[in-house]
Amino acid sequence: MHKFIIRGGNQLKGKVKISGSKNASLPIIFSSILTSQTEIGNVPLLRDTKTAISLLKNMGFKAVFKDGQLSIIKEANIKTEADYELVRTMRASILVLGPLLSKFKKAKVSLPGGCAIGARPVNLHLKALSKLGAEIKIDHGYIVANVKNRLKGAEIVFDFPTVGGTENLIMAAVLAEGKTIIKNAAKEPEIVDLANALKKAGAIIEGAGTDTIEITGVEELSKMEHTVMPDRIEAGTFISFVATAGGEVVIENFPYQTLETVVKKFQETGMKIERLNSKTVKVKKNNPLQGTDITTQVYPGFPTDMQAQFMATMCLAEEVSIIKENIFENRFQHVLELQRLGSNITIDGNTAIVKGVKKLIGAKVMATDLRASASLVAAGLAAENTTEIYRIYHLERGYENLEKKLQQLGANIEKRRTEQPY
């Protein structure tokens, strides 16, 4: 296992390039189950993308990944089972269920694991797939699903705009018989990216990015070639790094249109964010941060995946900030660790009351999930003395070469092996 050692106080200066989106890459990788051959560019090198590739290989697909380019070819004998040992580490593994059912008429998928940030039940996925004609049961920790002939299009109304459920249903419906209409669909940009990738292979999908998506099933898909969108959460995270550490950074490959809500909130804190062109922004901290309230919401609202990083920023802001978490019921686990660094945060249900302090002090802290890890890095960059962050394997699930990118910006951060029992 590894840890980060951060000696805070260095302002960030220079340029950084945002990697491909983790949350877009994973469903697109799994959508390759539907095609005979897939070429995907701008895939980030992460624990989660490597797990997804390993899962496909375990099923019998041939996959070659080099320098962000992923090639996937369907071999003759495909196993339609997703084993527990791979699925348990990544919740997105549930996304193999829809394409396996649609392409091979059967699937056996272990109930997923991943970050412990809330219940995130898969019942919405299963209920929707059942309406397409799938027979589903839970057997010894596995989802076992079958369809007699071919999935059939239907109208699905989600109780909640679930991102994973929307993605799973899109992938199931592209080869289903007839038309599928998804109402109250999630509208995240990563869903649009998945739809765009599938359309390049011949899928007929309309309305991605709105709350109503229509899919007309086709007999088969052709070769898929697609380049993954930039990671909007990584882009927002780097804004938080500049906000806590100070300095001036040019962020390249910045997905501005998908991140406007986050940009506006950071601007309310006093951060200067200047759009240099369609893919580049300059982020600068000129003055003390001002306390700003946020409430996490489904897209296009403030993303839950930026809540922890924004909270770390508000730990150093003047006055009081109110942060409400409306998506996951257990996503304040980073609060105790931020308190170890000297922050003043009080929790009341799904609300965090953050009273800014003049300085943070380095300490040993433990990452509890992916975005919590990033919040601790943001705080550590500003903290006096040394901060040690354990369990950074969480962070490596979603950030590509983070310590190297920060080192290039002047941060004093290193990755070191540890034998500590964390």
Image (tube, rainbow, N blue to C red):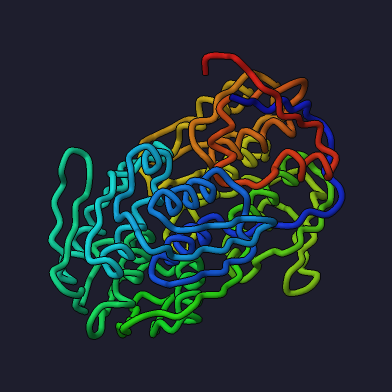
Please give the name of the residue rendered at 63% of the width and 23% of the height, measured from the top-left corner.
342
- Horizontal relation, residue 81 to residue 408: left or right: left
Residue 313 on image: x %, y %: 65, 41
- Closest to the observer: 171 or 230? 171
Q: Is residue 47 above or below residue 160?
A: above
Residue 347 on image: x %, y %: 43, 32
Number of marks present in the image shown: 0
Please give the name of the residue rendered at 86% of the width and 51% of the height, measured from the top-left corner.
14
Residue 401 on image: x %, y %: 70, 44
- Horizontal relation, residue 128 to residue 13: left or right: left
Q: Which image quadrant is residue 362 in?
A: top right
Q: Which image quadrant is residue 337 in?
A: top right
Q: Is residue 81 visible?
A: yes
- Closest to the observer: 138 or 364? 138
Please give the name of the residue rendered at 83% of the width and 44% of the height, measured from the top-left corner.
409
**Looking at the figure, which quarter contains the N terminus?**
top right
Please give the name of the residue rendered at 78% of the width and 29% of the height, measured from the top-left corner.
8
- Horizontal relation, residue 162 to residue 270: left or right: left
Q: Which image quadrant is residue 274 in?
A: bottom right
